[in-house]
Amino acid sequence: MPQLLIRNLDIETIQSLKERAKDHNRSLQGEVKLILEEYANRPDETPQAIADRWQGYFAGRTFSNSAELLREDRER
């Protein structure tokens, strides 16, 4: 099976990947492999398709008006 070498990753990126791997009970290599495979195999979505999906997710929901809370916070 072919191999891939990625050079010059930031320490923060590596640490984040290590923590994520630990949370999922995988090795660092296993976690990175899974991330790459999932990303490479997902269908391409247009920005419009993404927006439509999010609009569908929030359809029918009501949200409170936060303007009053913001005003109160500013007056403190």
Image: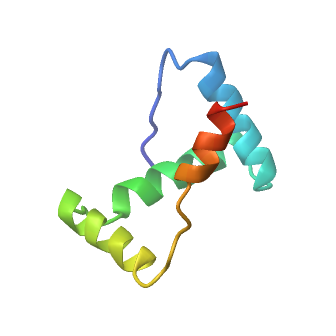
Camera-nearest residue between 34 and 59: 59
Q: Position of residue 50 (x, y in %)?
A: 29, 64
Q: Quadrant of residue 39?
A: bottom left
**Residue at position x 34%, y 72% from top?**
55
Q: Quadrant of residue 51?
A: bottom left
Q: Position of residue 10 (x, y in %)?
A: 57, 17
**Residue at position x 66%, y 32% from top?**
75
Q: Is residue 12 visible?
A: yes
Q: Residue furthest front?
A: 75
Relative to 21, say whether 46 is above or below. Answer: below
Q: Is residue 46 visible?
A: no
Relative to 40, say whether 49 is above or below. Answer: below
| 18 sits left or right of 43 in the view | right
Camera-nearest residue between 60 and 24: 60
Q: Position of residue 47 (x, y in %)?
A: 22, 57
Q: Residue furthest bottom?
A: 60
User: What colour scheme was applied to this rendering of the protein?
Assistant: rainbow
Relative to 55, say whether 30 is above or below. Answer: above
**Residue at position x 23%, y 68% from top?**
49
Camera-nearest residue between 61 and 11: 61
Count up the numbered dots: 0
Q: Position of residue 5 (x, y in %)?
A: 47, 28
The C terminus lies in which quarter of the figure?
A: top right
Camera-nearest residue between 61 and 6: 61
| 5 sits left or right of 41 in the view | right
**Residue at position x 48%, y 18% from top?**
7
Q: Quadrant of residue 66?
A: bottom right
